[in-house]
Amino acid sequence: MDEAVAAVEAALGAGAAYADARVMLTRSEAMSAQNAEIEDMRRAESTGVGVRALIGSSWGFFAVADLSPASVRRAGERAAETAKASARVAGPALELAEVPSVVDHWESACGEEPLSVSLSEKGDLLVAVTRASLASGARLAQASYRIWDTDKAFASSQGSRISQRIRECGAEMSATAVGDSETQRRSYPGIRGQYGTQGWELVRSLDLPANAARVGEEAVALLSAPPCPEATTDLILGSEQMALQIHESVGHATELDRILGWEAAFAGTSWLDLAQMGSLRFGSELMNITADATLPGALGSFGYDDEGTPAQRVDIVRDGMWVGVLSGRDSAALAGIPAGGMVRADGHDRIPMVRMTNIGLLPGPHSLEQMVTETSDGILMDTNRSWSIDDRRLNFQFGCEIAWEIKDGRQGRMLRNPTYTGISPKFWGSMDMVGGPSELTYWGTPNCGKGQPMQIGHTGHPAVPCRFRGVRVGVR
Amino acid sequence: MTSRPEPDAAALADHVLDVVGGRADATVSVQRVSDGLTRFANSFIHQNVGDEHTLVTLELVNNGRPAAASTSMVDDASLARLVEDALTAASVRPVDPNWAGLCPPAPQHFNGVHYDPDTTAVGPDERAGVVEGFVEAGAGLESAGYCQTTTVETLLVNSLGQRVSDRTTQAIIDGIHRDGRADGCGSVATSSFADLDGYQVGSTAASRARAGTDPIELAAGRYEVVLDPRCVAYMMDFFSIYGFNARAVQEGRSFVSVGEMQMDPSVSIWDDAGDPRHFGPSYDSEGTPKARLDLVKAGLTVGVTHDRRTAARSGAASTGHAVPGGASMGALANNLFLGPSSTAGVSSEELVAGVQRGLLVSDFWYTRVLDPKTLVVTGLTRNGVFLIEDGVVGPAVSNLRFTQSPVAALAPGRVLGIGNDASLAPGGLHFSWNHAPSLRLEHWAFTGTASG
């Protein structure tokens, strides 16, 4: 904490109107296996301080790895000098939404220290599950896990002093079958695996061994399955694909920095107009989306964001109406709303920016079984395979690994290469069935790219299966 | 704890190698980075960032059992922990039957090609000056983008005696101008900050934005296209990762088949880290020196990119394309060029003049692979699409979604012209920048409009 405080004081001394600093120590570990052999095993440690200084219309930010007193002070001064340089191309002065000054420590819950589980046990797990997938006919069987253990110390010029320890981990596996003209892949538990702010108990709960043979068999079966027909039909999505649907078409679309044009050159903007918040229908009345950073164990959970704002739950879509955004102190001030506590950086060396927390769909009154039973002609798709959406987050085309025909209320033959496309509010407006609380999964996405320089964010997406009416599928 | 406040890359690497001693074969890489990026939106600078760090990476092999560790902490205690961590990890894992040994001593073919000492001294004031020029070129429009300067010093040593080093600089201006919903883009990427003319790049972006207002809706379908260099460079990331990557080829996941005419005879593709028009280090993450590698010569597929693992599997030599963490990714080309195989290219105006009815496309966006083997991808146009009729660029067209294999689009007979306007532009998977010209292609399959 001393280093963070010294950096803040140096930035103030160099002319910053406001400054904050994060000292971070991150230990990480990753291992991957293919076809019953360990392919890669690496550990990493990184530390440093990142200092943010606000002058006029611009943030200045500077990061160093060296935590010596002189280096830390110099980082604070350079953050302020960098902000001053922005005055050559200046805009309206930035204000910050009020947040309370806090002195606190927070830790994510962790049952079994993931870095303490023996490497040989972890390696045996990956080897065993890839061997099982291989035995079921797949040509390539892959499995991996990743662990992050992060200590943060945050200090602001408004008096906050917050320390946090966040442990994250998760695992994934896949089987790929190779045909003459195409490949087919099945993943478990999803294309991005499953990650959370939990200990190794999360990986144990996934039970990779119980699913290894199945994914191999399904990958092989997909090679000879008929293709998903080109049609406009009823579409049932499994919860893993729903997580992707929420992430891309709701999460990014409601990031306030995008709506304000701050990400226009790269990540893009949004089809949403701030003036319509509170009056625009985003989807059907069954659509209730929250941004909730307080969910225990979900990947987008924390105690405080990287501006020192407490984690909170914010309604984004309520009964189908767009009512909220993802915000930080600067963007919230511009929009005239309270700070959302949704600003994070992927390391000490990156400037914090608006990031999704746990953006999830609240469960509804239905079940997946009921959706199938009540569909006379449709398609059930699951497990994301491809994702593409325009720079306003309006037009999307997503592909899944697997699909099944639904005829007269029964799940029928397997279909390969399923895709569907839509326009966001029309698609969400067609949602007429939403799975119940027992089908809720807190999916974790550990690879959300945004910003320049690019940052990789960890986001959570509570999701349940849903049904949509009249969707264009089988796009080629 | 003994600290090293001014870490010297060579001393750090040698120290780590000494700590490993005879306990394992080891490769030590030291990377010192100084990065500055000035970001603007709504026509003013809103984020201005800088970062300095040193990263030490140790890859070691103990009796055929490899493991890796890295740290940004360069005091003696942290470096000792780095070594012990890697040794511990290696001791508990199974033998790796695909381990291909350390890179033997080999001289670098070039060094310092992409280094400009003046660029190392550039700070936020100078970057703001470039941004100012970009913004001023689009008076009345909204601008957004970034100007970045980066200096990287690298050094790699291993237990066999390989010792290579390099210094590189990068300077980039990349941005858009917006006129309502119409965007136009421009960029320059180079090793020398002096090459950045913000006003000139901004003028290119502004003219496209102004021409893009009041777009017409066009029905989905197959259209002849003239793709700007930015579109072609965008697609080349897919070639690198899913195509010419020897690992993808060995596993049957790639379209690449060496010895077959897979592209039009007018097209060649090669990788050349030593070409001053590109940037990046002169050796790969295993220490293998980089050299020019032909991948497609006059439409004929002639090569793939290898690291030491894939090379050993194929009985070949590494081509110097190992990447960090590549044991599971394969070997990737990150200095790609696409160009005409024989005659010089023609101007973009001449490419357009040959089109009876088609589309001029400025940029692609959010493109992802539907099938890696056929390399069918889906994505959208961005930053300007224009209808071409009777050889003349006409009205702007609303953005379109496409579903297309870029390999099929470049198949024999389908490349109708190559431009002489090649430039370095960002790849679509954010993996690399690629050097590419405009291409006139017989068709590109647009499968929907961005509005529905």
Image: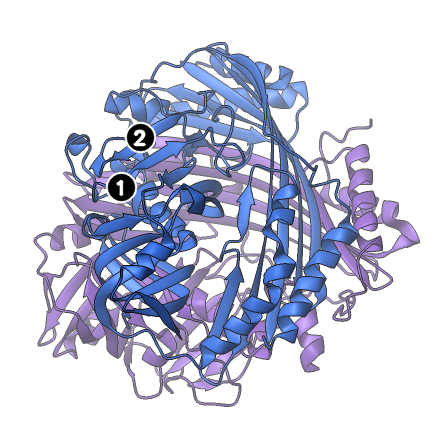
Instruction: Specify few, some or many for label 2: CA neighbours under 10 Å numbering under 14, 14-19, or 20 or more.
Output: some
Color encoding of the figure: by chain
Q: Residue at x 39, y 22 (%)?
A: A84
At mark 2, the secondary structure is: strand
Q: Are callouts 2 and 1 both on one chain?
A: yes
Q: Nearer the viewer, residue A45 or A320?
A: A320
Rendered image: mark on residue A156: none
Alpha carbon distance from label 2 to label 1: 11 Å
Q: Given the image, what chain letter belongs to the residue carrying mark 1?
A: A
Front residue of this view, candidates B293 and B88: B88
Q: Earlier in the sequence, mark 2 or mark 1?
A: 1
Q: Colour of chain A?
A: blue
- Picture colour for chain B: purple
Residue B258 vertical position relative to residue A18 in the rendered view, above or below: below
Residue at x 14%, y 54% (from the top left corner): B212
- Disc 2: which residue: A315
Amino acid under disc 1: Met
Which chain letter matches label 2? A
Q: Which mark is residue A287?
A: 1
The percent coordinates of residue B109 (x first, y second) are 65, 67
The residue located at (77%, 71%) in the rendering is B97
Viewer-side residue, A78 vs B378: B378
Quadrant in the picture for the C terminus of chain B = bottom left
The vertical placement of B386 against A290, above or below, is below
Labels 2 and 1 touching (C-beta < 8 A):
no
Badge nearest the viewer, 2 or 1: 1
Q: Is residue A18 visible?
A: yes
Number of numbered discs: 2
Q: Residues within 10 Å of mark 1 (few under 14, many from 20)?
A: many
Q: Nearer the viewer, residue A260 or A166?
A: A166
Residue A1 lies in quadrant: top right
